[in-house]
Amino acid sequence: MPLILVLLLSLAASTAPVVMSPNGQIAVLMETSGSGVLQYQVHYKGKPLIAASRLGIDTAGQPPLGDRVKIAAVRTGELQETYSMPHGKTNPLVNRANTAEVMIEETAGPLRHLTIDVRAWDDGVAFRYRVPAQPSLRELKLEKELTEFHLAAEGRSYPLLLQNYRTSYEDSYVALPLTSIKQGALVALPFLAEVPGAGWVGVTEAHLENYAGMYLKRANGRVMEAALAPLPDEPGILVNRSTPMETPWRVILIGPTPGALVESDIVLHCNPPSRIQDTSWIKPGKTSWSWWSGDLAKNVPFKPAMNTETMKHYIDFSAEAGLEYALIDEGWSATVNGRSRDLTRTNPALDLPAILAHARQKNVGVWLWAHWTFVDMQMEEAFPLFEKWGVRGVKIDFMDSDDQRMVGFYHRSAALAARHKLMVDFHGAFKPTGLRKYYPNVLTHEAVLGLEYLKWSARATATHNTIIPFTRMLAGPLDYTPGGFSNVVWDEFRPRFVEPLVPTTRAHQLALYVVFESAFQMLADYPENYRGTKELAFLKAVPVTWNETRVLSGMPGESIVIARRKGREWFIGAITNENPRAISIPLSFLPAGAYSVEKYEDGPTPSSASVSTAAVTPASTLQANLAPSGGAAFILRPR
């Protein structure tokens, strides 16, 4: 008898509620232990993936809610919807899941009530707590969330280990056996792990609103437990809310390979629909950016700085390259005591009205950078002014936390920006949790160690780049700022702040525009480093929004090959770590027909790609030899 059938028969014989995925391959079992502790299990293709794991919450002045309980009632249902978004890796999106509301009540003590919402898709599960209003729980001061993720077997894991909750998520992922993670070490989400013999899991969260961001800590053995960012002004309290309330969704992405998790849209499915009725003004796109290259002067009759001439220079390049935007970074606003403070006045060295007029003439939109503290103080005055000036978006930076108060700032600034038709890039940010679904003017988040780190370190390596898609990108888009064109071999690399070098090949950098998802994508380098290059044609052509995404192969820390479709065109990006790699890419995913392929492959030196064309069909296989820290990028168009 097949193992999955044995599992289904045994679950059917149980009195505990079971939620099955539509294809029957994932099963979530909700139950209470012999002592009345609420817990859950997850099985995948008939094998245990998440062993019995505790559920519940611990509030100040009361016993934990989740101990000494019983399952009082269960209401099952299903989700079936199709929706569209202005940007993302899939469009339209199909949300199909089986659901359950599991009503819990205590068997002793104050007799409090709790509901667990459970959803099961074909590629993962999610659950959340709902605390109804009740006499014994009018105010909820959360001291701990008791959620556990007990992985059923020891395997590889890829934690992002952090020192504390004051974090920008900008650090290096490491590969460790699960039980080699130190007990109590703070692990950021998303968290990727293999359960040998069963599958891969990615743990993250969705719909984070009026709550604290979640992390994980290894408790003992293979148990990872939830840890929430504490409130800065209420010692010991993580969340302070009145009831009724609901927590964010705790998401477990599931698949046979780590690449399957990258394709999932569960994080978006767990979020409410758009709160913006008219989204026609939301225009994803690519941008030039002066900050990366420093005050670099090449073939220009002016001294580069945060001044009018420099900004016009980048706007001119955006127009030439077909980029929708130019980003004006730190230093444009008036300063007090040497710091950018007043978002309603400009730096005297910069004629912002003239710059904006020049951008309009060139059909280029302008984004402005702002420190979050000044946005917090001035957004009610500054955002209407930005709209009046014709600014298209704002890059908000240096939040570096996700406690309940800071999460509230994200929502307030996104909502007010939408009211004034401003798009948003959250830089110095926590990982995305699907805010972009109900505020689609939020195009991207940073929350990653990106290319900028090459200005002062050697940390944005090829290996790092091959881990990010399987870890950080599970949460959503990332503002990595690719496009470094001063490419050198590793032995020649040295960090430098002006005209930084890049220890990955030109083709690797091109491929990142396909590998990394972001609806606001930067061409980080100096205009003169792009002008006249054959690789600029790819950067002009590659989209920032997609209709379909497929991970064709790859393993974290080794390589990834990913294909994305926009309309009838397909773009493929392939990157490798510091080892050379021969790859084969079967094109059987293509619809029937004849195609032309434009190839950008590693050339004889890191600073130049080899460009060629060929005719292919779905029966063809692309072959590419990736150099150390190399890559390849392909455009496939119907003939």
Image: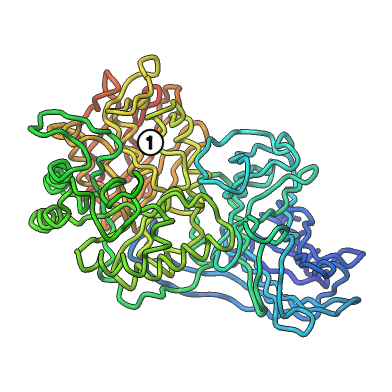
Q: Position of residue 382 (x, y in %)?
A: 31, 65
Q: Residue at x 66, y 72 (%)?
A: 117
Mark yes or no: residue 172 visible. Answer: yes
In the foreground, 277 or 238: 238
In this view, which residue lies farthest toward the top? Answer: 491
Residue 579 falls in image quadrant: top left
Give, as a three-letter code, the residue at label 1. Answer: Glu
Percent across and percent down for residue 387 are 24, 67
Q: Residues within 10 Å of mark 1 (few under 14, many from 20)?
A: many
Residue 71 on image: x %, y % = 81, 75
Residue at the spot 10% in from the left edge and 57% down from the top edge: 357
- The answer to whether residue 559 is above or below residue 58 is above
Say if residue 124 shows up in the picture.
Answer: no
Q: Is residue 122 left or right of residue 226?
A: left
Q: Which of the two residues, 374 or 149, is positioned nearer the viewer here?
A: 374
Name which residue lies at 32% across and 68% down. Answer: 381
On the image, the x and y values in percent for residue 167 come to 55, 46
Q: Which residue is mark 1?
A: 452
